[in-house]
Amino acid sequence: MCNLYSNTTPADAMRQLFDVAVEKDRLGNAEPLPAIYPKHMAPIVMKDEDGARELVSLSWGFRTTKKSKKTGAILQPHAWNNARDDKVLKSGLWKNSFEEHRCLVPASSFCEAQGRNPATYHWFALKGSGARPPFAFAGMWQVSRYEGKEGPEEVPAYTVITTSANDIVRPIHPQRMPVILRPSDYEVWLDGSAAQAFELLKPYDSDEMEIVRSGVGEKSDTSL
């Protein structure tokens, strides 16, 4: 699972990388985000009603109603920040968003924890020029509607799709890793059919990745 990542890429660089027109940048004065957790706001690239790419800030994690098993009282909603690749065309939570509302999730690195009390945090990034070459996770979005403590609520939200771990991630987190898309696949991911998009859900080449930061309590990728 991916529960923590960073995005420290400036907005102008994101616009260039993801082919977003200046007037379609809805981020405002975007600050670097060295630690993004579930329910935090972060940039995504999605298609607007006219089919143009736009940069917007959404909340990480699809929301669903959560109730106390003992009392039935409404609790803080579940935040589903990851979607398994083998469930995106089967689960009712994911299917419509995968078919209709895929997005790119800009990132600079992602973190996996190893062990407990204390955990060691390992940050993974792509090799290349610069401190943290920018990339994008495969994501999808929706307007989540759920029951809150004060009644019905809704929030525009996104989730990150995960797949099998590759050779560099597996020793740290054996089962899963986020799907990282190549720039040449962005158009298919955003505009292609569900079948075409599904073919992109695979582990990234481990030879093109590296661990850039490790340590107990290293919950932020700030060494840029």
Image: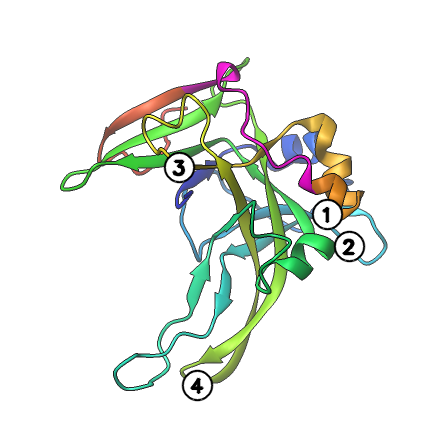
Q: Is residue 170 visible?
A: yes
Do the residues bearing badges 4 and 1 touch, measured as CB atoms within 8 Å?
Answer: no
The disc at residue 48 is 2
The region drawn magenta spans: 198-210
Say what secondary structure mark 3 lies in.
loop
**How far separated are the C-alphas under marks 4 and 3?**
38 Å
Q: Is residue 19 left or right of residue 161?
A: right
Which residue has dot 1 on it?
54
Do the residues bearing badges 2 and 1 touch, measured as CB atoms within 8 Å?
Answer: yes
Q: Residue at x 43, y 34 (%)?
A: 110
Say what secondary structure mark 2 lies in.
loop
Which residue has dot 4 on it?
150
> Which amino acid, mark 4?
Glu
- Residue 100 on image: x %, y %: 74, 56
Compared to 63, does 207 lie above or below? above
- Which numbered disc flags the more N-terminal residue, 3 or 2? 2
> Which amino acid, mark 1?
Glu
**How far separated are the C-alphas under marks 4 and 2?**
31 Å
